[in-house]
Image (tube, helix red, strand yellow):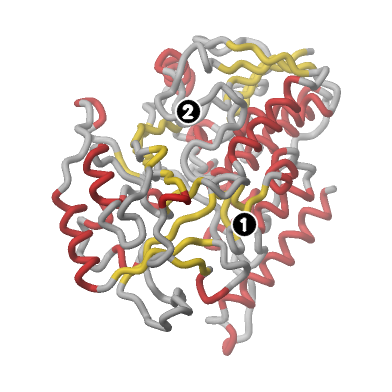
C-alpha cells in the first residue's frame, strides 16, 4: 500500500522518510517550483523560510528537550540539522542551503519515495498525510476547510532581513554571546540612547506594506511579531525584547550599552547573517534606511529584505487526536504548522510522529500516543484538547507539561524544575521504545 504525503517541507519530508524507512512506498507531492508560496525561494525540500535557527539544543530548554526526544525516536531531519550546524551559541542554527540540499538528496535517492512536483487540489481518498504547511495553496486549503467543517484561523508570520557580513563595520560591531555563554558567535551592534531614539523614530514612522482586504482581520502570532508591532507597544519594548543589552558587553570598551542589535550566522561560509528578532513588514526602502541607522550597519548590503505572509492552520482540537490522526477518517493525518504547532523544531517533530503513526496504521500496529510528560506528547495533547475555545498556535514550552513536585524552598528554582522535567521526559520516551 502507498501513502500520499502532501508537502515536502520540514514536516512532510520527515514523515516521508519515516514511512519509507519502514518499507512503505510514498508519493511525496510538492507544488514548488510550478507554484510558489510567496515566501519560499527554492524548489528544495525542507527549505528554511524565516530564521535559520531551530532554537536551543540544551535540554534545560523546552525546545532543546524536544530535539532530544526526536533523536531518541529516530528522527531523520534532526540528524541532518546537526550535520549542517553553524555556530550560534547554545542554539542549533544551520546552513539553510546545505540542509535543504541534503534533505532533498536523501528523499530523491530513497527507493521508497517518489517526489512528484505537482500541486494536489483535492485530498486523496487513500492513506494521506497533509503537511502542506502554513502557506497551503488556496485550492487545497478550501478542500481542507470542507473536510474539517471548520473555518481556518489565520495569523501573520514575518521574515527577518539577511545581510552580508563583509559590509558590517567591525569598528563598531563586536562578537559575543549573551553572558559569554558558549562560543562568541553573534555579531552585536551597540546603541547609545541617542542612536536608539533615532532608530525608534525611523521604525515607528516608516511606511508598511499594505495588507490586502481579506488579510486585515488576521491575527499575529505573539512569538514572531514584526518589530514595528513590538515598537508600537512602547518606546522601551524593544530594549526589553530582541534588542536587550543585558549580558552583551564589548570587551574593547567595557561599556554597558543602551540597546543591542544581534545578528546570527546564516550559512556555513559565514558570509551571511540574519538580524535576530527583526521580522518586519516595512517597505523595502524603509528597511534599508532603518538597518543603515544601526551602528555598524551604516553601509550594510541587504541580500534579503524582510517580508510578511499569511499562515493558515486548522482548528486541531476539533479535528485531530493526539496521534495526529483525524477523528473523521483513520487513514488521514496532519503534520507540521498547519496543525497549529509553531516553529521549525515542532514542525519536524510532528512530521516524525505522523510518519511513525501512519506506518503503524498501515502495518496494523497500535498507534503511539506519547505521554504528556514528554514535550512532543504535551504538544500533541495540547493541540488536540477539545476544551480549547479559542485555539491559537503554540511552541514547545514548559507550561504545557504536567508540573513536577518540588520542595517548597525550591519551587522558584526554574533550572531544577527544567532538569526534573527533562529527566521525566527521557524516561517516558525510553519506556515506549
Q: Residues within 10 Å of mark 2 (few under 14, many from 20)?
A: some
Residue carrying label 2: 40
CA–CA distance between discs 2 and 1? 24 Å
Image position of 423 with respect to 316: above or below: below
Residue drawn at (44%, 77%) of the image: 249
Does residue 318 show up? yes
Where disc 2 sits, the SS reads loop
Q: Left or right: 76 with respect to 229?
A: right
In terms of image quadrants, where is residue 79?
Answer: top right
Residue drawn at (55%, 53%) of the image: 396
- First of labels 2, 1 by sequence position: 2
Residue carrying label 1: 87
In x, y percent, where is residue 288? 27, 44
Nearer the observer, disc 2 or disc 1? 1
Total marks drawn? 2
Given residues 101 and 399, the one toward you in this image is 101
| Quadrant (top left, top right, bottom left, bottom right) of the N terminus | top right
Q: Residues within 10 Å of mark 1 (few under 14, many from 20)?
A: many
Given residues 319 and 228, the one toward you in this image is 228
Residue drawn at (32%, 50%) of the image: 299
In x, y percent, where is residue 314? 46, 31
Residue drawn at (67%, 63%) of the image: 59
Image position of 310 with respect to 377: above or below: above
Where disc 1 sits, the SS reads loop
Image position of 67 with respect to 144: above or below: below
Q: Left or right: 210 with respect to 140?
A: left
Q: Left or right: 18 with respect to 9?
A: right
Amino acid at each position: 500500500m502507498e501513502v500520499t504525503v502532501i508537502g515536502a517541507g520540514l514536516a512532510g519530508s520527515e514523515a516521508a522518510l519515516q514511512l519509507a524507512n519502514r518499507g512503505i512506498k510514498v508519493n511525496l507531492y510538492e507544488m514548488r517550483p510550478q507554484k510558489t508560496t510567496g515566501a519560499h525561494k527554492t524548489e528544495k525540500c525542507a527549505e528554511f523560510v524565516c530564521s535559520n535557527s531551530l532554537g536551543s539544543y540544551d535540554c534545560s530548554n523546552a525546545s532543546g528537550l524536544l530535539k532530544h526526544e526526536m533523536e531518541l525516536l529516530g528522527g531523520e531531519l534532526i540528524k541532518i540539522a546537526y550535520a549542517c550546524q553553524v555556530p550560534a551559541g547554545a542554539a542549533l542554527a544551520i546552513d539553510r542551503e546545505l540542509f535543504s540540499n541534503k534533505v532533498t538528496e536523501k528523499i530523491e535517492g530513497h527507493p521508497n519515495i517518489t517526489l512528484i512536483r505537482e500541486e494536489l487540489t483535492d485530498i486523496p481518498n487513500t492513506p494521506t498525510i497533509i503537511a502542506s504547511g502554513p502557506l497551503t495553496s488556496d485550492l487545497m486549503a478550501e478542500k481542507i476547510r470542507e473536510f474539517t467543517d471548520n473555518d481556518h484561523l489565520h495569523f501573520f508570520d514575518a521574515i527577518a532581513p539577511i545581510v552580508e557580513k563583509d559590509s558590517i563595520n567591525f569598528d563598531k560591531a563586536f562578537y559575543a554571546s549573551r553572558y559569554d555563554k558558549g562560543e562568541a558567535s553573534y555579531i552585536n551592534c551597540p546603541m547609545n540612547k541617542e542612536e536608539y531614539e533615532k532608530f525608534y523614530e525611523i521604525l515607528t514612522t516608516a511606511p508598511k506594506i499594505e495588507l490586502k482586504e481579506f488579510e486585515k482581520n488576521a491575527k499575529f502570532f505573539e512569538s514572531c511579531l514584526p518589530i514595528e508591532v513590538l515598537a508600537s507597544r512602547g518606546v522601551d519594548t524593544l530594549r526589553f525584547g530582541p534588542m536587550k543589552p543585558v549580558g552583551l558587553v564589548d570587551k574593547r570598551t567595557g561599556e554597558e550599552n543602551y540597546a543591542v542589535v544581534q545578528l546570527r550566522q546564516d550559512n556555513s561560509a559565514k558570509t551571511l547573517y540574519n538580524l535576530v528578532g527583526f521580522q518586519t513588514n516595512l517597505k523595502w526602502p524603509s528597511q534599508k534606511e532603518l538597518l543603515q541607522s544601526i551602528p555598524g550597519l551604516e553601509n550594510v548590503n541587504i541580500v534579503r529584505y524582510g517580508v510578511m505572509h499569511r499562515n493558515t492552520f486548522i482548528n486541531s482540537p476539533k479535528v485531530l487526536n493526539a496521534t495526529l490522526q483525524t477523528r473523521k477518517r483513520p487513514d488521514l493525518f496532519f503534520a507540521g504548522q498547519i496543525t497549529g504547532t509553531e516553529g521549525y523544531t515542532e514542525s519536524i517533530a510532528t512530521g516524525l510522529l505522523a510518519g511513525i503513526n501512519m506506518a503503524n496504521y498501515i502495518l496494523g500496529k497500535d498507534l503511539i500516543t506519547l505521554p504528556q510528560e514528554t514535550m512532543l506528547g504535551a504538544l500533541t495533547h495540547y493541540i488536540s484538547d477539545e476544551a480549547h475555545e479559542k485555539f491559537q498556535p503554540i511552541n514547545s514550552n514548559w507550561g504545557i507539561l504536567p508540573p513536577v513536585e518540588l520542595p517548597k524552598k525550591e519551587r522558584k528554582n526554574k533550572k531544577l524544575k527544567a532538569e526534573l522535567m527533562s529527566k521525566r521526559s527521557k524516561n517516558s520516551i525510553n519506556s515506549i521504545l
